[in-house]
Amino acid sequence: MARTQGEFFRLRDEPDFARFWTGQSISLIGSEITSMAIPVIAILSLGAGALDQGVLFFCQFLPALLFGLHFGTLIDRFAKRSLLVYCDLARMVLLLAIAVLHVLDALSIAALVVIAFLVGTFSVLSAICGQAYVPDLLRDNRLLDGNTKLQKVTTFAEVSGGSLAGALVQALTAPFAVIVDAVSYAVSACFISRVRLPGRAPDTEVHEKPQIWEGLRFVLRGAKLRAITLCAATSNFFSAMMVSLYLLFVMDGLGLSPLLAGLLLSAASCTALVTGFLTSRVTARLGVSGALVAGQAVMAAGCLILPFAQGPLPLVSVYLVASHGIFVIGMIVFSTTQLTYRQQVTPARMQGRVHAGNYVITYGAYALGAMAGGLAGEWIGIRPTLVIGALGHILAAAWLLPRRVRITAEDGPATGPERRPDGGDEDESRGDFVHP
């Protein structure tokens, strides 16, 4: 296989990717508002406890387990651009329903759980579709920089969205704050609809029906891709244990207001603004596996700080900012590196199914972790559960330690029109992992 060299690019050099990137940027900022508003609605308006929070987060990610593989075949058969637009519009309607139910005094935990499940369903489809769409918009040697740009969008959404969410929730009340997210989905749909490339898999005829299990087999068959996927799944499981209890911990346990909680999250996320450009350099220096292990180690270090947050408000603020800031650094390195590797070893005709197979495993684990976090929070308390969640990231890195699954810059995935069909196993062709 030809050896490829990575390169940086400016958004104006890739106009279709720029439109996709803009749409994602807008919707992600709105999603940050909803990610805070829905749990706050449950806590403040409906009196939710730890178990309720676990169920709420579980239902948001349960669709990954139920529908993920089916979504993969759907994505490989139809235009990805259209699917992304439909997902945005569907989520817009569902979020507006929260405000309507609140006005009618009909909002309940059960209604919120159903809406969270439906929003989660379209979010899963959108997330898988977006990951599969990027290789249609960019050449292989621009994938890492493209994924880094998208990760920076996510980080910017955290930086701006967290504080904006806190302010809106406090000023408008949480049920009406989600209207801002509904508007953001409408704007995102407008931008994505202007992408010229429809994103249809080039090797799939209209009458063909892709095999539903093919993507999952691809993910699990190769030793290297399998190890990365199981590492991400383990990491997600323990992250979800913490995330499902985070707002309950800082608001009820530490006494922070929604506005202050959002401001502290935003301040912590600023670390990522100076971290995004480091991903390619870390990967070049440590190799793919080294970057992934380092990312998990840094995430664990950040998580271990959180359970010990206590004392006066200034000290608590330092704990929270340090915990989330360090976690974000590790998350960016890990997430961008593993996604780029998977995109590069996946044939173009299978992008949807392979990302769906990965999503079923990793976010199915996230759904189970959210439920486990809620149950553990009820039974043993929130702080002990947070400690368990933090230590789990160390366990996740163990999947990447055996010699046969290690990937270096000199032993990366083959790239090109015909990528290896085995997900990067031991006998794969040698090539360069794309990095600048």
Image: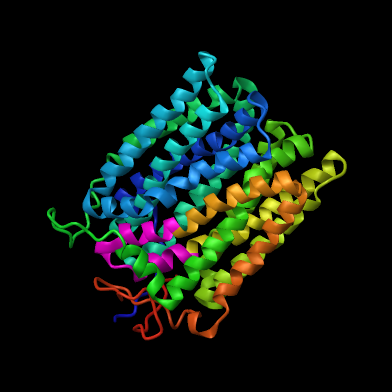
Tell me the quarter of the image containing the C terminus: bottom left
Q: Give the percent coordinates (x, y) of residue 377.
A: 71, 46
Judged by its main secondary structure, the magenta piece is helix
User: Which residue does the image show at 34% across and 44% down from the upper left?
Assistant: 19
Q: Give the percent coordinates (x, y) of residue 286.
A: 56, 77
Residue 349 against residue 421 in the figure, above or below: above
What's the colour scheme? rainbow
Residue lying farthest to the top in this orientation: 104
Residues rendered magenta in the picture = 337-360
Q: Is residue 284 visible?
A: no
Residue lying farthest to the front in this orientation: 379
Residue 254 against residue 233 in the figure, above or below: above
Q: Is residue 225 visible?
A: yes
Q: Is residue 3 left or right of residue 286?
A: left
Residue 53 against residue 391 in the figure, above or below: above
Q: Nearer the viewer, residue 81 or 248?
A: 248
Q: Give the percent coordinates (x, y) of residue 398.
A: 60, 74
Q: Quadrant of residue 333?
A: bottom right
Q: Is residue 292 left or right of residue 394?
A: left
Q: Nearer the viewer, residue 111 or 343?
A: 111
User: Which residue does the image show at 25% across and 73% down from the upper left?
Assistant: 418
Numbered label tally? 0
Tell me the quarter of the image containing the N terminus: bottom left
Q: Nearer the viewer, residue 206 or 289?
A: 206
User: Which residue does the image show at 80% across and 48% down from the upper left?
Assistant: 309
Residue 117 is inside the magenta segment: no
Q: Quadrant of residue 263?
A: top right
Q: Give the percent coordinates (x, y) of residue 167.
A: 63, 28
User: Which residue does the image show at 45% across and 41% down from the upper left?
Assistant: 120
Residue 354 is inside the magenta segment: yes
